[in-house]
Image (spheres, rainbow, N blue to C red):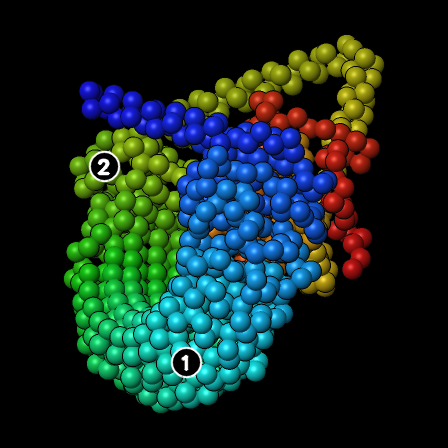
Amino acid sequence: MGHTLAAYMVAASLALQVIGAARVMCPSDPNCVCGGTLALELNCNIDGRIVEINLLPNTYINIKCKNATTLDYNKLPKCANKMNTFKSVSFKDCPLPSTSFQEVLTNIGVSKTMALIFQNAKNLSGYFDRKHFTGLHNLTKLLLSVNGITHLPDNLFMDINKLTWLNIRSNSINLSEQLFKPLERLETLEISHNHMTNISSNLFSHLSFLRKLSLWQSNVTWFSKDFFTGVNVLEELDLSSNGLNELPSSIFKPLKKLKKLTLFSNKFSSLPQNLFKSNDDLETVVILNNDVELKDLPKNLFGNLPNLKQIYIQRCGLVNIPYDLFANSPQITNISLAYNDLEKLPESIFNDQINLLELDLSHNNLRNLEPKLFSSLVRLEKLNLCYNELVKISGSTFSPLLSLLDLNMEHNKLRTISSYLFSNNRQRMSISLAYNELSFENRELHNNSWIVNRVSPFADTYNLRLLNLSHNNFKHILQDWWINGHDILDISYNSISSLWDDENSTAKYGYRKIFKKPLKEVWVSHNVFQCRCTNNEFIDFLQDDMNTKVVDLQDLDCPFWASGTCSMRIVILAIIVTVFVTFLTILAIIYFDLRKQVSLTLKKTLYNMSQQNPTNNTGRGIVVEYLDMDEEFVLNEILPGMRHYLKNEIHVNAISSSDQNTKQTFISPVKEMYTTLVIFSPNYLASQYRYVNIKKIRGEMLKAKNTIYVFVDTGIEDFTFAFLKGQRDLRTTVLWSGKDCWNTFLSITASSDKEHLGRLIKKINTGKIELTTSKSGLWPPDSRNIYALDASHMQV
């Protein structure tokens, strides 16, 4: 307790010192208003130009200009009582000073800085000159990205030759051969998003300390074989999105220290033999989204690389791969060949890959797996085979996978699985076999009659983290699913009628004797359950005795009184019928006595209800949300299909791409009565989530309610969009280019309607949602960006 109190006191003391320092530094400038706590914040009006200054003593100064095409930098306030050193100084959306940056920094109280950032997204009206950097002898980092400049003079960096990090990304510069010559100490160079069609072969030849180089989307369509001569210690190289259609076989020969190479979004129809022959230090190779079909790879392309660990070749149109593709490269831990057109794999392709941990073969056309395909993968932990054409799996195929933790075989055509498929595995696995044609029923001819044997391949598999058997053809439950100690079981969307095997039925309080441990979660809905006491009793046992969460209990079709009251069902039914008949009798007596009054009251009530009820529609209303850049696609593809397949009330919400800081949403007091259909394209992603990291984007998509995401490949697709599409939630997303797109969309919409209707009625009855009315029915009072479309009269 004493140490904790002392720590709090020290922290408080430091905070007070920083706050006191900030207060002391507040300048008494008549043009500025000073504020802030731990950091100093100044809002200044310099000759009608608004300038915001944010600084932390001895750490950083950030200067941001608003609508300032010109600025007298001499009128900026002095931000320190005495000259101080700052780690970084940045200028955002400010005009170029007429003097050097050193003079500007001196005026505001900066004696020295190691990093200078200057960005103007509205494009500069002037040009950088050598004078701007005169005096900045100690500068090691310089960022001049996103300025719209088209020219940099050859002598620009003459006075800042200590630079180790330079970023001139997202400009339109044609770089000269002399520009980088003074920067002999440069270690990182970022020049992506430029126009370098006439790039010199000697541009980087003198950068002998360069370790990281990015030429991403720089319009480089051709390289000479000696292009990288001189950059012998280069470790990371990004040549993505340049439209490259070929590479010289010796292009990477000088790069003896190369560790990571990225080549996505190019146009390679082939790759040369021995491309990486000299790159013994190579660890990661990424080839994604090739714009033409790279049908074949050369033999031994990734062979004889002693340090190679990660290989990602996705969306390249691969049809065949050689048997020795990875030969003699024993340190590989991750291989992804997903999103290609592979129909078969050589049986020896993964020979000697004893260190492989993750293998992704999803989204191909694999029809079978050779018996010894995985014979060397004793350390493999994650195997993804979803979205293929697999029909059966033999027992010997997976028997070597002793370390397997995650197996995904969703969306195949599996009908047969060996009964001893997982008998060798003792790990806490997650197994998903959803969206297949499995039943675990084998027909055998015995004494001239067919006998059906039901054998589970999981009979000797225990303590799984997940067993997902949803969306298959199961008609009967197998007891080992319940009793082998799994954490999560999903048997939804099958044809199961009974949750427990009738031949081995057990009294309610006898189930516990055969359960090894309770399940944590189960999904059982969308089966053909009969509302029998045995099913209700078993669900009660799971919930009450085993503390198992039945996640989709609300989706079961049995009436509420069926559970827990089986022994009294006849009595309850008799009481209900008696009460109902008595009620009707009383109503009849009242009606004959007060016929006229009742008639008038009913008419009045029906009239009021007709005025207040929303327009009848089939299912909940649908709001189609999309970026205005995708409007033509939505009008020509999405809306006609919805008009054909749906009868829901349909609204469209077009989001303007010009305002990238505001994400419009459908605001309504009855929002829960609508399903939002988001046209999730690369355009939509770039506009609405430009500054949001990929983890937050995926988290927002997973948490979204009443929302269906339609992945549409309009716009320039990038790695983030490909990742989100590959890791999407199948319950709430649809691939526009996928098979049976409309059937999938209708299935998700129907499931969402059914789930939300019960919740909505409950909230309306408890007063949590108030329905607003107008002459046209339920509708938000403010709908400037939303237009109602009658599905039966919609014209496109």
Q: Secondary structure at mark 2?
A: helix
Give, as a three-letter code, the residue at label 2. Answer: Tyr
Q: Quadrant of residue 461?
A: bottom left
Q: Position of residue 680 (x, y in %)?
A: 58, 56
Q: Quadrant of the C terminus?
A: bottom right
Q: Secondary structure at mark 1?
A: loop
Q: Position of residue 429 (x, y in %)?
A: 25, 54
Give, as a three-letter code, the residue at label 1. Answer: Ser
Q: Quadrant of the N terminus?
A: top left
Q: Label 1: how many residues lie within 10 Å, few (<14), some (14-19) or many (20+)?
A: some
Q: Label 2: how many residues lie within 10 Å, few (<14), some (14-19) or many (20+)?
A: some
Q: Please state which of residues 392 and 38 is positioned toward the viewer in this rendering.
A: 38
Q: Quadrant of residue 98?
A: bottom right
Residue 74, label in figure? none
Side of 368 where 425 appears, left or right: left
Q: Position of residue 3 (x, y in %)?
A: 20, 24
Residue beneath the point at 49% across and 58% down: 135
Would you say residue 43 is visible in this rendering? yes
C-alpha separation, residue under disc 2 versus residue under disc 1: 76 Å
In the figure, 372 relative to 789: above or below? below
The residue beneath circle 2 is 511
Residue 205, label in figure? 1
Residue beneath the point at 48% across and 45% down: 110
Q: Position of residue 556 (x, y in %)?
A: 46, 40
Side of 710 where 471 appears, left or right: left
Residue beneath the point at 18% across and 67% down: 378
Side of 221 where 455 appears, left or right: left
Q: Please state which of residues 92 and 747 is positioned toward the viewer in this rendering.
A: 92
Contact check, label 2 and label 1, Cβ < 8 Å: no
N-terminal of the two: label 2 or label 1? 1
